[in-house]
Image (spheres, helix red, strand yellow):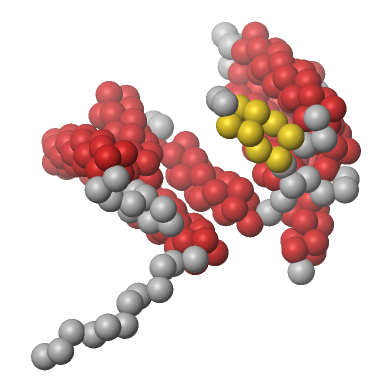
Amino acid sequence: MAKSNVKSKPISQEEYITNKVLSVFSICLLGVLMLMVLQRLIGYGSTWAVGMMVCKALIVVGVLGVLWSLYLMMQERSGKRSAQNRVLSGRNVLIVSVVMVLMLSIINFIGTAPIKAFYVILPALAVYYLIYHSYAPEFFVVSINCGAAAALSWVVHRALISSNMRAVAYVAVAVMAVMVVLELAAVSAIRAKKGKIELFGRKAELQLSKNAYIMLTATPIVMTVLVAAAAFGGASAYLVCVGAAAAYLFITAVYYTVKLM
């Protein structure tokens, strides 16, 4: 049979990003299903031993994934394999494998307690990845601020309902305040250089929209006020502050989604 002379077209950058985002969502969904199985097995005494065995086996799989990713990276560095527009690249495999090993190692040493947090973290990572590739750069930062405010408000709430950890609530407010100071300083520096930045020897120019600097300045301040309100408003203020952060993120998401159209 004669060989076909038709060469396959190289995948475009848009197709690569689409495939990568779909892969991230699929991996996160698979991770959630894996966590559900582990919680079911480890959560009962009759299947605890089986669950721990499965957890250790998955850690080994993750370690093998790390080793494979290092091999792929060596192949890519030597020029024997191209990583351009390739979902199954050494760096991507390394990130997935390291996250897998870290999560399963925590479950192996602590038990099922962290799984509820992982149920939130994995979908959040997928959503943040989608925002990073699909929306304006400033909206990605805005979403990070809203997520940090919601997470720290939860920490504040847990600290306030515990008589021995009330000081943690004020530490959470201090952490958010430090984040705001660093972010505002970075925004000021980027604005002074008109969106041009240099990081680790690499130069880049951020494609910021007209109202980007207003959003990047106002959002962290608003989120800090919400975290402080959760700390000083009592345990009942937690839901109000988280709801306000979620509403702020939703309204901003609608605004930037409309701008994409």
Rendered location of residue 62, percent (x, y): 24, 39
Let me know if residue 37 appears in the view: no
In this figure, what is the number of numbered marks? 0
Say whether residue 45 is left or right of residue 188. left
Instruction: Please report the residue visible at 31 percent of the width from the left and 82 percent of the height from the top.
Output: 6
Q: Position of residue 91 (x, y in %)?
A: 37, 41
Q: Quadrant of the C terminus?
A: bottom right
When the figure is inspected, residue 100 is found, relative to residue 182, above or below; the finding is: below
127 or 163: which is nearer to us? 127
Q: Is residue 18 above or below residue 98?
A: below
Q: Residue at x 36, y 50 (%)?
A: 83
Q: Where's residue 37, x and y in %? A: 28, 49
Q: Is residue 120 left or right of residue 224?
A: left
Q: Is residue 39 left or right of residue 167?
A: left
Which image quadrant is residue 92 in? top left
Quarter of the figure with residue 111: top left
Identify the residue at the far left of this view: 1
Q: Which quadrant: the N terminus? A: bottom left
Vertical side of 245 occupied by 177: above or below: above
Which residue corresponds to the image point at 71% horizontal and 16% vertical from the top-left? Answer: 178
User: Does 258 appear above or below 83?
Assistant: below
In front of the other: 163 or 89 = 89
**Residue 238: quadrant of the picture:** top right
- The answer to whether one can see residue 117 in this image is yes
Q: Position of residue 204 (x, y in %)?
A: 66, 38
Farthest residue, direction bottom: 1
- Left or right? Give the position of 103 relative to 203: left
